[in-house]
Image (cartoon, rainbow, N blue to C red):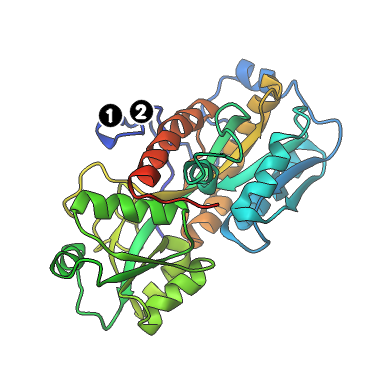
Amino acid sequence: MQTRMRNEDPGLADPGRRRAVGLIAAGGAALGVPLAARAAETEWAPRSAVRIVVPFAPGGTSDIVARLVAQHLSQSLGKPVVVDNRSGANGNIGIAAVANAAPDGHTLLFVSSAFLTNPAVAPDKPPYDPVRQFTPVCLAVTSPDVIVVNASSSLRTLADLIEAARRQPGALNYSSPGNGNSVHLGGELLWRRAGVTLTHVPYRGAAPAVQAALSGEVQCALTALPAARGHLAAGTLRALAVGGEARWPDLPAVPTVAESGYPGYRSETMQALFAPAGTPAAAVRRFGSEVRRILALPAVRKQAADQGFEVVASTPEALAARVADEAPRWAEVAAAAHIRVD
């Protein structure tokens, strides 16, 4: 299993502006941080248990990664770290709970890209402000979105799919894990760039969206990679393209969407850690440092890769840059495609 690990760069909005910033060393005990800086980061310590709110049901991708981090974090902090699943309203209930929590370093949010897309699809009454109400801590992992078809489909490349959609506007259906999420918006961004129309069929989650492609209910499915990996390995699904910036190690023959004729395109599902706005800077530094150290552990990296995630382990500043870039970008896509969720 080949594993990649990257640091997010503040210029990540447009791959043409991105610059490489190096790899975090395996093992990650020092992480290249001077001893004086590490000592400063450990000055803050929680007084009691730390609660990580996951705004989705147990067993989902956010929950899996959050529990992986929490297990190690409790050991390094010397206090219990509890994962609190607050699901409902596509994550808005749990996210709002953290926005309104005391900013004392004892409540955190571990959330997917829904954090950025929920306000985009509710422009008249956004449920929260992802910039003003939260403090970025660490972008933990990402998984590329992937376009898949049934293995028996005559569509073998993204170009085949686009050409079929061009010949039959609106006749081809595609499934996604739900209306208005990052996968749906990523699909609409691609179709608009290609100048084609496909009919969106939303499902309640990634598993049924993938099943729709397997059963032939839709011509293709868009999903984050973890939901499709097993079917791709079994040969029941075929991947046409991945939405990340580089080919996925387990799918070396599958090109990126950018390589397939749409330079600059990126559609990934992120899993990131935030704190309520106003959380002490020392607490943010401590949590960020600890989470980056945890994500650098070889065993953790392997577990993440086995689930279909790429470890990023960003700084708070890099996560802030990503939020500042993607929040307005998804709002533009939602407005252009007339995507709204009440």
- With respect to residue 315, does 311 lie above or below? below
Q: Position of residue 20 (x, y in %)?
A: 33, 32
Disc 2 marks a residue whose amino acid type is Gly
Circle 1 crowding by C-alpha within 10 Å: few under 14, some 14–19, many from 20: few
Marks 1 and 2: CB-CB under 8 Å? yes
- Find residue 253 and name its label: none
Q: Hey, which quadrant is residue 197 in on the image?
A: bottom left
Can residue 31 be seen here?
A: yes
Residue hosting label 1: 17
User: In the shown orientation, is residue 159 left or right of residue 318?
Assistant: left
Residue hosting label 2: 11
SS category of the residue bearing label 2:
loop
Residue located at (16% from left, 68% from top): 160
Circle 2 crowding by C-alpha within 10 Å: few under 14, some 14–19, many from 20: some
- With respect to residue 76, does 224 lie above or below? below
Rendered-image quadrant of the N terminus: bottom left
Residue located at (20% from left, 48% from top): 262
Disc 1 marks a residue whose amino acid type is Arg
Residue nearest the observer in this picture, 139 or 43:
139
Q: Position of residue 199 (x, y in %)?
A: 32, 66
User: In the shown orientation, is residue 202 left or right of residue 73?
Assistant: left
Q: Hey, which quadrant is residue 34 in on the image?
A: top right
Q: Position of residue 156 (x, y in %)?
A: 20, 72
- With respect to residue 318, does 164 lie above or below? below
| Mark 1 / mark 2, whichever is N-terminal | 2
Q: CA distance from mark 1 to mark 2?
A: 6 Å
SS category of the residue bearing label 1:
helix
Residue nearest the observer in this picture, 325 or 336:
336
Q: Position of residue 257 (x, y in %)?
A: 25, 53
